[in-house]
Image (tube, helix red, strand yellow):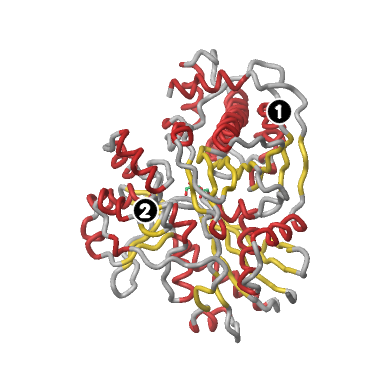
Amino acid sequence: MAKKTIVGFDCGNSSYRVVLGTYDGVRILTEVIDQIPNSMVKAGNYYYWDILRMFSDFKNILKRLVSRGETIDSIGICTWGVDFSLFDRKGNMLNNPLAYRNALGEQQLSEMTDSERKQMFLNTGILCDKINSVYLLKGMKEEMPDVYQAADRLLMIPDILNYLLTGKMLNEPSEFSTTQLMDVNTKSISDFVCRKMEISRNLFHDFGKHGEAIGYLSDDIKAEIGAGYDIPVVCVPSHDTAAAVLAVPARQTHFAFISSGTWALVGTELLKPLLSKEVYEAGLTNELGAFGTITLLKNGAGMFLIQKIKKEYETDAKREVTWEEIVKLSDEERGKRIPLIDMNDIRFFNPVHMGKEIWNYLKETKQAEGGFSWNTIVKSVYESMACSYAVTIEHLQRVTKEYFDCIYIVGGGAKNELVNQMTANCTGKNVIACFGESTAMGNIAAQLNYFEPYLELKTIREIVCNSVETKSYMPDTDTSYLIDSYKKLQKRS
Ligand code: LFR
């Protein structure tokens, strides 16, 4: 395959990035063209995402690339999962996408019995979680009936951007699996879930196929960015987790990964879903990955807690602080007792003040006393993160009957040396931190399949292995004893 210049858009909850990938026949070299902060917008009673700002920023960056002389061979879009907008029959967007941190989903899910939840899991492979689109959609149907009634189509966030770029609507499968509206066995829309949740089946479109073109940049956009040639927009695994897993530089067939960002996804890649009782009880979920794979994973709280803490700490300090300073707060606690929190306790999902919420938790569980301490709080988050990883790795080994001798960490969180070491210590395993933009790497690597449709997953991974820089962490202190205390806290929540 000749040299290719490929654009990957990776949109996360806290920032979005545009990455330019150059494939030279052996490896992909990446350059981050821009990184722009992102956040939910509170308007009236709800939290929303500003999708049009993302679209407009993306177009401006494409324009910049064209004017600096790049010839773009293709484009792919990835974003987080679960959020969507509804469209009317004429293709107009009816609502700004609501954010999954709205209370709507939780309210709907709380009405379901245990046996209903199990049925939903067996049908979709997906664990019932308040953030899954199906609950938000049901909530919208009740709270915004006019919008719901006017809807003809539902597009997930990456599908929306693909549509705005090309005029073509489709639902991309990996992203769609996060709705919990896909039958995991037939990989088509679940009639069972639609019936049960009273959701119209007609809202959904045909699924795209990874590696195929969705369409080409519309003439308007081509003119706007100054491109005098056609640019295909390729159907990539557009759920950021699926793309990040594709970017794991593993040569083994069975491997464990942690995709660390606002969320922490701890899992392994499979060819078929696992729907056993053990999987269900361990809180694992079978999402769709790249090119027909399944990513069996635990969807847990990740850097969200510490991202919120950083902002609060800055407010207290009345200045901006670096991540190094935040990490140092924890390091200053070295040798002291290690306080833990259950990372996934609902009280940390979207509290008014994360620091205070954690401090109260530590006091209630008798792990802290005296005056409020940022050091203790930060330490507890980082150590708890490592513990939560260790518990999930234990579950994954049990349900898959595989032993993982190392763990790959991808995503922005891989830069956190302290947590990498804590994870090695708590799991007793070799941790391999993978640097660079993992989601963008997976996005760009998947697009190679458009140029060479017979390129197999194994070959794409080999290209990834040639392209990703890693750093290895071996356990240096045994902290596996913390796992039992962590499990006790999990039971308490
Ligand atoms: C990670 C992620 C998770 C998803 C969460 C919310 O960025 O996509 O996989 O569960 O965000 O969409």
* In-image side of 44 versus 403 (left or right): left
Q: Residue 358 or 75: which is nearer the viewer?
A: 75
Measure the alpha-carbon separation of dots 1 and 2. 38 Å
Q: Are marks 1 and 2 in contact (CB under 8 Å)?
A: no
Question: In the figure, is residue 30 to the left or right of 91?
Answer: right
Vertical position of residue 63 compared to residue 126: above or below: below
Q: Is residue 473 above or below residue 123?
A: above
In the visual, does 360 lie left or right of 379?
A: left
- Label 1 vs 2, first from the N-terminus: 2
Residue 58 vs 220, above or below: the answer is above
Front in this rendered view, residue 393 or 34: 393
What SS does tag 1 mark? loop
Where residue 223 appears, as percent x and y from the top left, is 54, 84
Amino acid type of disc 1?
Gly
Q: Residue furthest bottom?
A: 228
Quadrant in the picture for the C terminus: top left
Residue drawn at x 39%, y 42% as measured from the top left: 121
Q: Please tell me whether residue 17 is drawn above or below residue 487 in the rendered image.
A: below
Instruction: Please identify the quadrant where the N terminus is shown.
Output: bottom right
Report whether residue 286 is seen: yes
The verdict on label 1 being within 8 Å of ligand 1 is no
Q: Residue type at mark 2?
A: Leu
Question: Mark 2 highlights which residue?
Answer: 181
Seen at 73% across and 61% down, the residue is 463
Of helix, strand and loop, which one carries label 2?
loop
Please name whichever residue, 414 or 352, is drawn nearer the observer in this view of the structure: 414
Q: Position of residue 229 (x, y in %)?
A: 60, 85
Q: In this rendering, does residue 129 appear at all?
A: no
Q: Residue 459 in the image: x percent, y percent?
A: 70, 61
Residue 414 sits in quarter? top right
* Residue identifier under label 1: 428
